[in-house]
Image: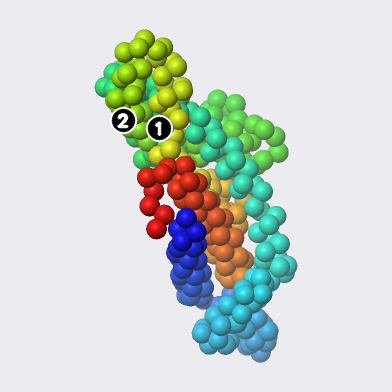
Amino acid sequence: MLQFIVRRTLSGALSLAVLITLIFFFARLSGNPTDLYLPMDASEAVRNQIAEERGFNEPVLSQFARFLSDLARGDLGQSLRFARPAIDVVAEAMPTTLTLAALAMPIATILALILGSLAALRPDGIFDRIASGTSLAAAALPDFWLAIVGILVFAVSLRWLPTSGMGTPLHWILPVAILVFRPLGILVQVVRTSMIAVLSADYIRAAQAKGVRQATIVMRHALPNAIIPMLMVVAYQSAGILNGAIVIEVIFGLPGVGRLMLDSIVFRDFNLLQATVVVTAVAIFAVTALADILHALIDPRINHG
């Protein structure tokens, strides 16, 4: 088991290192940030002075070496746009994104357990066909399209919900509902498939032959075993919510990490972009690694060697 944890940690660290390297070099392809933060009539001397102070006039490899040295000390640099430590800016935006994820994933998981289990009770039945078709559509529809349609219907036409902001609980309904769709569609399919496989097992048929109630069979015998394959999917979908949050936070005007990441690209705030990527990548790695370890502990069929 220890070898499994070490191997999983090393593979995640390697992926994180590759991602950080790619972000560093790709970000600098957008140009010199001083062109955005200085007036157009600024003299060449002023531009060179700012570039020298920020290190933008150094060779890219020298900048990368300095970035790695600072990162090893836990220093992610100063944000150009906010003139503050980049990690502090990310820390202020993180609660919004975490709130979206904390609201969306439990809702998606609970609904998926209910809908997937009901669909599996009668495969190819009317409810199963409706649930399967709806879940496939939910998993395929893009978040930005759902967000726009939701705003047009519930905010503009019906005027039930606000279009943007986060001042009241009503402001969270549309963003959370949009984020629920994709993981819900995927999880319903996973639960349905797992439940069908479990309900066809010999021990389930034996329980049915003994006259055990269907509700008892589902809740006490089938569902606990069907949840195991769902754990990994829930973990990866939780990590995927961070990707969906970029679109949702921009459309609904939520000051989260996703919107901060997009703004840092637009404003060429390299240090802030790198800080958002490092923080979100570490969070995703931690969630998926924990899910792998829990899955290995729960399911004895996992090879730890």
Check the picture and name the quadrant holding the C terminus.
Answer: bottom left
The residue located at (46%, 61%) in the rendering is 3
Q: Amino acid at mark 2?
A: Ala
Q: Is residue 36 visible?
A: no
- Asked whether, in this view, residue 79 is left or right of residue 21, the answer is right
Given the current orientation, which residue lies at the most extreme top position?
211
Q: Which residue is label 1 attached to?
A: 226
Q: Which mark is residue 201?
A: none
Distance in Å between CA atoms under marks 1 and 2: 8 Å
When the figure is inspected, residue 12 is found, relative to residue 122, above or below; the finding is below
Q: Secondary structure at mark 2?
A: helix
Q: Which residue is label 2 attached to?
A: 197
How packed mark 1 is, by other alpha carbons closer than 10 Å (few <14, some 14-19, many 20 or more), is many
- Position of residue 278 measured from the top left corner of the image (x, y, whole percent): 57, 64
* Dots 1, 2 in contact, CB < 8 A: yes
Circle count: 2
How packed mark 2 is, by other alpha carbons closer than 10 Å (few <14, some 14-19, many 20 or more), is some
Q: Secondary structure at mark 1?
A: helix
Q: Amino acid at mark 1?
A: Ala
The residue located at (65%, 81%) in the rendering is 54
